[in-house]
């Protein structure tokens, strides 16, 4: 699943291509929006909110909603591509869920999920449940730490993936944050020695990678090993050489089961 920095970079790319332009044609390929036509709307901004992509639209016609918000989520397989008019798509047409066209560019959403169009004043209904965005203007480290500590019995390894607590962390960052703060994934949030340090590390990693084409947590972009533990099952820990382990992690708080990589020597579970 894409991390918050992926959606952040995508929003910037789409914003550069679409913002300020008027839509000349739109084609929705999802049942609930199949008859929707946004031709004539101007793209005001494309922004990210956690892992959600938001396209803000406006029009100067009194008979229509003057301001709209279009939300999409990449989930596991989704992506947006940009094409010149008439250019052949790189992916099969049957995977396209939305096509937005201006005079100069076509933006095609393939396999995106949670497509929803609402009046701008209802945007909060789409993303208001999210916690502080690690890459957003609303970032609040103290609030994020409080959110994590509000569920003291919850494993930190699942809490970090809960977008309601803080928004933008996916599985790669979850594993790397836990390694760098020396926390076992099953450590209850209430037993984390320094939750502020966990939040600070989360912010540091996403901020460091938000403009990188290649995500790295171990050093420069040219490093051979970009991650400390993620994807390194049975390989030696880059810090202590102990074989990295893998566990499937979920909990009663509703977290989906996800693979979690960790070093059993560097990340010991305290009794």
Image (cartoon, rainbow, N blue to C red):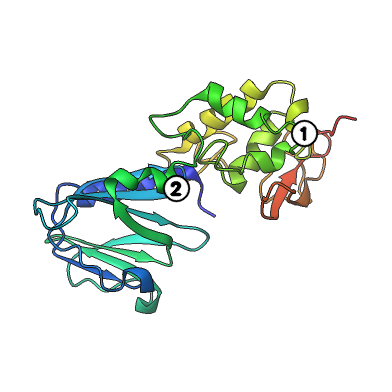
Is 61 situated left or right of 175 in this image?
left
Q: Examine the rendered structure and indicate whether residue 242 appears above or below residue 102.
A: above
Q: Are marks 2 and 1 in contact (CB under 8 Å)?
A: no
Is 173 situated left or right of 57 in this image?
right
User: Within the image, what quadrant is residue 87 found in?
Assistant: bottom left
| Res. 6 mark | 2
Label 2 residue SS: helix
Residue 143 x/y as whole percent: 54, 25
- Quick one: label 2 or label 1, which is nearer the N terminus? 2
Rendered residue at 32%/57% (across/down): 117
Residue 224 x/y as whole percent: 59, 44
Rendered residue at 41%/47% (across/down): 125
Neighbor class of circle 2 (other Cα within 10 Å; few <14, some 14-19, many 20+) is many
Residue 80 x/y as whole percent: 36, 60
Distance, label 2 to label 1, CA atoms, is 29 Å
Is 156 situated left or right of 133 in this image?
right
């Amino acid at each position: 699943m894409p991390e918050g920095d992926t959606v952040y970079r995508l929003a910037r790319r789409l914003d550069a291509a679409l913002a300020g332009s008027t839509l000349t044609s739109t084609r929705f390929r999802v049942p609930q929006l199949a008859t929707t036509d946004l031709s004539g709307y101007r793209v005001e901004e494309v922004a990210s909110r956690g892992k959600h992509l938001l396209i803000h639209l406006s029009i100067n016609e009194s008979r229509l909603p003057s301001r709209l918000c279009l939300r999409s989520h990449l989930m596991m397989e989704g992506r947006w591509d940009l094409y010149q008019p008439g250019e052949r798509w790189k992916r099969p047409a049957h995977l396209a869920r939305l096509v937005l066209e201006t005079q100069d560019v076509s933006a095609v959403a393939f396999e995106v999920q949670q497509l929803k169009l609402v009046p701008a004043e209802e945007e909060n209904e789409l993303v208001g449940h999210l916690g502080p965005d690690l890459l957003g203007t609303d970032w609040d480290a103290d609030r994020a730490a409080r959110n994590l500590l509000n569920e003291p019995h919850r494993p930190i390894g699942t809490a970090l993936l809960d977008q309601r607590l803080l928004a933008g962390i996916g599985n790669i960052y979850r594993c790397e944050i836990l390694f760098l703060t020396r926390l076992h994934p099953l450590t209850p949030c209430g037993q984390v020695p320094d939750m502020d340090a966990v939040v600070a590390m989360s912010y540091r990693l996403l901020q460091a990678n938000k403009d990188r084409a290649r995500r790295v947590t171990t050093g420069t972009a040219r490093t051979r090993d970009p991650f400390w533990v993620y994807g390194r099952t049975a390989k030696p820990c880059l810090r202590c050489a102990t074989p990295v382990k893998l566990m499937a992690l979920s909990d009663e708080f509703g977290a989906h089961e996800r693979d979690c990589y960790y070093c059993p020597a560097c990340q010991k579970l305290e009794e």
